[in-house]
Image: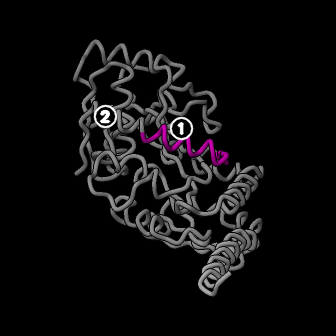
Amino acid sequence: MNRIEQLKMSGLWRIAALALCTFHVLPAAAQQWPDKPVRVILSVPAGATPDFTARLIFPGLSQQLGVSLVADNRAGGGGVIGAEIASRAAPDGYTLFISSPGALTILPHLRKGLPYDTLRDFQPVSLISVGPFVLMAHPSVPAKNIQELIALAKAQPGKLNYASAGNGVANHLAGELFKQMAGVDIVHVPYKGAPQAVSDVLAGHMQLMFNSIAPIVPHIKSGKIRVLGVASAQRSPQMPELPTIAESGVPGFEAVNWFGMFAPAKTPRTIVNRVNAAVAGTIKSPEMQARFIALGADPVGSSVEEFTAYVRRDMEKYARIVKVSGARID
């Protein structure tokens, strides 16, 4: 073998050795994870109800992973600011992202030019919880259940109205989905936030609204609001006596506000699996389940595969709703 061939072979060996080292280093880094605090990006303001709900799992996760979790609240843009930061983070397991559907499965169909792609830039880790909407009505509405409401709406097309927290938000699209699946014509009236919308339903200025359970429980108990059905796939443990809309004449209907854990795309699967197991282990404790339910959320703790499929279905669902309804954002 001449000198040139020796150099070539030497170079090839160095390349092969480097590739072999790289192959071994990456899994080793993943196996040693975590050895420092993990940042969790939250796309909501600190102190808000969604922020408090998301942070419920922090102590349990910290205990199971053996390091502290640091909340990084990046509110604004309907969740887009936090989502963009999370999508651009290094996929090393030291940045996680807790999100609701708004930024990841709704806005992609309402806003062009988002700085991220939900399916390309994020790795779903676990569905933490779902917060089912209920369809509530002012007591003056002459319908005591979903079947009676559908009959009333079909007899008086365009006469009933429903309030929402704003154009393009989850409870607006829940109303549009109900209209599509029940085959009724109900007029949408957007507000600038849920509190004002709920107030106008309480006052009788508006007739219907999809809303989370927890904030309206006192009004339900006082008789100021009537709930006609829950929008989850199964009855909610918060109100087990309340039928689902799906079992009340609108098969397959589901409209919930969920919280899920994500990692940047290309995060090693060993790390993703460890976070998933930690989330599931935390959520399955009886104490944690009770705390979620008290806040109006049903705890889940899904597998990686289940949540990945869930996100895809959610995107497809909202794509259909937006297309058929022509929904727009302000």
The boundaries of the magenta stretch are 299-315
Q: Nearer the viewer, mark 2 or mark 1?
A: 2
Question: In the rendered image, which residue does mark 2 sit on?
Answer: 162
Look at the numbered discs 2 and 1 and tell me whether their residues touch, using CB distance below 8 Å: no
Amino acid identity at mark 1: Lys
Does the magenta stretch mainly form a helix, a strand or a loop? helix
Vertical placement of residue 189 versus 146, above or below: below
Question: In the rendered image, which residue does mark 1 sit on?
Answer: 221
Residue 217 visible in this rendered orientation of the protein: no
Vertical placement of residue 53 versus 165, above or below: below
Label 1 packing within 10 angstroms: few (<14), some (14-19), many (20+): few
Q: Secondary structure at mark 2?
A: strand
Amino acid identity at mark 2: Tyr
Identify the residue at image location x=56%, y=24%: 243
Q: Secondary structure at mark 1?
A: helix
Q: Nearer the viewer, residue 225 or 55?
A: 55
Q: Nearer the viewer, residue 255 or 20?
A: 20
Q: Quadrant of the N terminus?
A: bottom right
